[in-house]
Image (cartoon, helix red, strand yellow):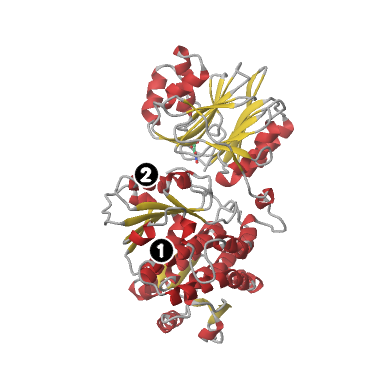
């Protein structure tokens, strides 16, 4: 969601801040702003739209200074207007940027209005800056005033604050929203994500919940929620900076689709031997595998779809019950937890607000243990879970998730096999599954070879207004994921159904204007799915079929056929995902939408 950057240096920081915002733009991109502190005061530019609009303002009127804060917004309270863009000011002497939601902003706003504060925006954020201003009347030190203010806020925040006449430090804080400190030489930074600072440092400190940090040129002082000074370790970022470049590709999404053979290999590395899953991949404490009798998977969006596939795998291979639920539902209901249940979360960023809240709730409910499958090693989800299996996909920038999804599935298959081994899976079957996993990168690579053909299919598809995706078994969650991808980036209305449900309602929608995308697995569901396709063909629906060529569907007259490599059926959901990603991508390109930053969305959903 919103992205924050703050910098203090012995050089001008405006270019550093704007470059940081460009790198954070995937988090939110409806408006942006910068406040710069210099000897004369605090000055700001704000602009509606992409960061480029802000850059244009700096071209016309540069702002220079050695300290500043910056923000790219994904609006939650108030429209994306210049008045609502951050930084927000109290008078002309305090400026603040904020990521998150202040849930009690209404009573706070009333109190502040009664005290004479005038509000210039519709945001919840503006209360914070006035509260700090008000606190400074009795507590003139900015750090202390921020600490006092934070105790009054309900909700989630990461903030950065600068004060006129205080040119040697700025204050930042986090609770519920991500924030890292970037450590430089005689210059220091904060940002919502390390990626925003990789052009200035590779040394980072991860702040804990409730931390308040005083950032100066010579160092950072971190105070915990109780106000005690803390030492937090510095970690070095170890991804190649090129991982955040588009390289030869026109969009991050396409680059990330093509990275999948490589990152799936990275996800498998060290987790499987020739014939076994290496349980050491769960860390020192893999004893839970022996004890687990139930699994609860909780996630959002694309990660939720990965969890749905894992339910089939866990129940099929391990024979133990598994339930899957979206985090925003789970967190607000009373959950019955059977004994010896594993709580498993999935999140690309590890900062998804609902998933984090679900994890915190689960920790009070007597689960056997908590396991996070996540792409960001330094994320809050990883730090707060007892066990972690990293997906090792590298930074994912495109808002529509691709490689994060297929590596989540890979990690989930490893986990499913590991649990199954303790529940009677034979050594022979384990070996067969591990060998299937070893072949996965090559099959994903083969699936990418259909790119040119899928581009042609997309040309035909792009004028559609609706689409129906069908699958059975593990292909049903993949149908859901395919329809989500199409919605997200091409804005075509799409729905997904288990194919057997067709005649219970959605068949009423089928006519010659309704394309049907059918994911046909080569397993014992094949004949049943073929019957479902006949039901569609009989009503004139246009059929787009994704299947291997031995399914004998490639020569049917009324079918637009895309070949998917023939693989072990356990791998089918992963391999079938690739052509659907390519289809959505090419349809979006034909339609001319903003592929990497689709409207109204943001990459890591750090607000509820
Ligand atoms: N609530 C603030 C910040 C929004 C945000 O963090 N989005 O991710 C606003 O609406 O400006």
Q: Secondary structure at mark 1?
A: helix
x, y percent for residue 338: 26, 57
Q: Are marks 1 and 2 in contact (CB under 8 Å)?
A: no
Q: Vertical placement of 106 versus 318: above or below?
A: above
Depicted 192 relative to depicted 505: above or below:
above
- Residue 269: image x %, image y %? 57, 62
347 relative position to 311: left or right: right
Residue in front for this viewpoint, 383 or 54: 383
Mark closest to the chain's N terminus, 1 or 2: 1
Q: Which residue is mark 2?
A: 360
Q: Residues within 10 Å of mark 2 (few under 14, many from 20)?
A: some
* Above or below: residue 591 compared with residue 575: above
Give me the C-alpha separation between circle 1 and circle 2. 22 Å
The local crowd at label 1, few if under 14, some if 14 to 19, many if 20 or more residues have their Cα within 10 Å, is many
Question: Which numbered tag is attached to residue 603?
Answer: none
- From the image, state whether disc 1 or disc 2 is nearer to you: 2
Task: Tell me, for residue 308, which label it has, or none.
Answer: 1
- Residue at 62% x, 63% y is 262
Could you say whether the residue bearing mark 2 is in a helix, strand or loop?
A: helix
Specify whether residue 65 is in view. Answer: yes
171 w.r.t. 54: above or below: above
Q: Nearer the viewer, residue 178 or 201?
A: 201
Q: Residue at the location (56% across, 68% down)?
A: 578
Q: Quadrant of the C terminus?
A: top left
Residue 287 in picture, x, y percent from top left: 38, 57
């Amino acid at each position: 969601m919103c992205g924050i950057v703050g910098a203090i240096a012995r050089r001008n920081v405006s270019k550093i801040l704007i470059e940081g915002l460009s790198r954070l733009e995937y988090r939110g991109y409806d408006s942006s702003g910068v406040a710069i502190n210099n000897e004369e005061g605090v000055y700001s530019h704000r602009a509606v739209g992409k960061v480029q609009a802000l850059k244009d303002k700096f071209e016309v009127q540069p702002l220079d200074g050695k300290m500043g804060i910056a923000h790219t917004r994904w609006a939650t309270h108030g429209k994306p207007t210049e008045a609502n863009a951050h930084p927000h000011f109290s008078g002309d002497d305090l400026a603040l940027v904020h990521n998150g939601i202040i849930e009690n902003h209404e009573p706070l706003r009333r109190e502040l209005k009664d005290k004479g504060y005038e509000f210039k925006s519709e945001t919840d954020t503006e209360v914070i800056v006035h509260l700090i201003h008000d606190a400074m009347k009795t507590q003139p030190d900015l750090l202390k005033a921020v600490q006092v203010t934070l105790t009054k806020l309900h909700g989630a925040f990461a903030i950065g604050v600068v004060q006129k006449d205080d040119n040697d430090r700025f204050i930042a804080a986090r609770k519920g929203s991500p924030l890292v400190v970037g450590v430089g030489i005689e210059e220091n930074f904060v940002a919502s994500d390390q990626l925003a600072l990789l052009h200035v440092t590779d040394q980072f400190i991860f702040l804990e919940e409730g931390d308040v940090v005083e950032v100066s040129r010579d160092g950072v002082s971190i105070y915990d929620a109780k106000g005690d000074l803390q030492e937090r370790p510095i970690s070095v970022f170890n991804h190649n900076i090129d991982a955040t470049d588009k390289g030869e590709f026109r969009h991050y999404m396409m680059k990330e689709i093509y990275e999948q053979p490589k990152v799936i290999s990275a996800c498998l590395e060290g987790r499987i031997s020739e014939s076994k899953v290496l349980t050491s991949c769960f860390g020192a404490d893999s004893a839970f595998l022996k004890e687990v009798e139930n699994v609860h998977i909780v996630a959002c969006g694309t990660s939720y779809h990965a969890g749905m596939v894992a339910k089939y795998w866990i129940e099929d291979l391990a024979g133990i019950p598994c339930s899957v639920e979206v985090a925003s539902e789970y967190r607000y209901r009373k959950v019955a937890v059977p004994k010896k249940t594993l709580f498993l979360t999935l999140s690309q960023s590890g900062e998804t607000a609902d998933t984090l809240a679900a994890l915190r709730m689960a920790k009070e409910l007597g689960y056997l243990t908590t396991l996070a499958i996540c792409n960001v090693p330094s994320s809050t989800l990883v730090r707060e879970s007892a066990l972690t299996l990293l997906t090792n996909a590298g930074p994912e920038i495109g808002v529509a998730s691709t490689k994060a999804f297929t590596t989540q599935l890979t990690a989930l298959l490893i986990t499913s096999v590991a649990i199954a081994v303790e529940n009677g899976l034979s050594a022979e079957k384990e070996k067969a599954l591990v060998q299937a996993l070893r072949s996965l990168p090559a099959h994903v690579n083969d699936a990418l070879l259909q790119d040119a053909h899928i581009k042609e299919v997309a040309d035909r598809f792009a004028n559609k207004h609706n689409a129906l995706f069908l699958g059975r078994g593990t292909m049903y969650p993949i149908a859901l994921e395919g329809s989500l991808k199409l919605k997200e980036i091409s804005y075509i209305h799409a729905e997904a159904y288990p194919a057997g449900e067709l005649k219970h309602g959605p068949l009423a929608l089928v006519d010659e204007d309704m394309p049907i995308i059918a994911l046909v697995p080569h397993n014992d569901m094949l004949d049943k799915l073929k019957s479902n396709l006949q039901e569609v063909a009989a009503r004139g629906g246009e059929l787009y079929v994704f299947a291997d060529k031995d399914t004998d569907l490639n020569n049917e007259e009324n079918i637009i056929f895309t070949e998917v490599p023939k693989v072990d059926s356990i791998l089918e959901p992963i391999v079938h995902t690739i052509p659907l990603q390519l289809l959505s991508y090419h349809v979006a390109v034909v339609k001319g939408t903003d592929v990497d930053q689709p409207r109204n969305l943001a990459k890591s959903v750090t607000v509820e």
